[in-house]
Amino acid sequence: MNLNSTMFVQAIVFLILAFSIAKFVWPPIMGALDARAKKIAEGLAAADQGKLAMAAAEKRVQAELAGARDEGQKRIADAEKRAQMVADEIKANANAEAARIVAQAKADAEQQVTKAREELRAQVAGLAVKGAEQILKREVNASAHADLLSQLATEL
């Protein structure tokens, strides 16, 4: 065999091999590569959708947190208002009780002053009777002169 025929045979074998690879080997490899590329593209699309969903969820979470903060602040403000109202009510009740106690004390003091005046009038009346007794050198009958003594007591 000469060199040309060997090269011709090699060329034919090469063409048969290239045709066999192109016909039987290349399509499954290309199919596998296409499937892998498709899976990668789907994975990237899913990752992008995941990022978008995560961003949306994060926005919702931030909105929920802001709402919860606002609700908490509102509840705190309401509680402070209620506490202030209760404190004011307690102060008003305490002031009313203090006024009642002061009024009771004034009434008691007035009653004691009146009682002391009555006792003083009785003592003065007794002293006046004794003084009159000493002056007249005779005994003045207190029951007989009760009207006179009560008139004297009212004048004092």
Image: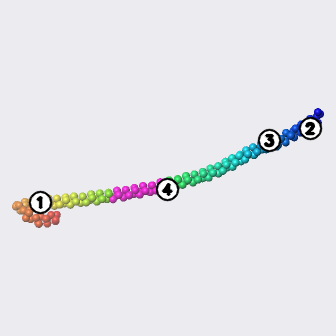
Residue farthest top in this picture: 1
Would you say the residues marked 3 and 1 are in contact, meaning their CB atoms lie under 8 Å apart?
A: no
> Gap between marks 4 and 1, in whole Å?
77 Å
What amino acid is labelled 2 in the image? Answer: Phe
Q: Residues within 10 Å of mark 3 (few under 14, many from 20)?
A: few
Please give the name of the residue rendered at 92% of the width and 35% of the height, measured from the top-left corner.
Answer: 6
Question: Which of label 4 and label 2 is nearer to you?
Answer: 2
Q: What x and y, as percent, mark residue 121?
A: 16, 61
What amino acid is labelled 3 in the image? Answer: Val
Q: What x and y, as percent, mark residue 23?
A: 82, 43
**Comes first in the chain, label 2 or label 1:** 2
Q: Residues within 10 Å of mark 2 (few under 14, many from 20)?
A: few
Q: What x and y, as percent, mark residue 37?
A: 73, 46
What amino acid is labelled 4 in the image? Answer: Lys
Residue 90: which quarter of the image?
Answer: bottom left
Q: Start and end of the magenta stretch? A: 76-96
Q: What x and y, as percent, mark residue 54?
A: 62, 50
Q: Which mark is residue 126?
A: 1
**Comes first in the chain, label 3 or label 2:** 2
**Comes first in the chain, label 4 or label 1:** 4
Label 2 secondary element: helix
Residue 52 seen from this side: yes
| Horizontal side of residue 3 vs 82, given as left or right | right
The residue wearing badge 2 is 8
Please give the name of the residue rendered at 64% of the width and 49% of the height, measured from the top-left corner.
Answer: 50
**Comes first in the chain, label 4 or label 2:** 2
- Magenta segment's dominant SS is helix
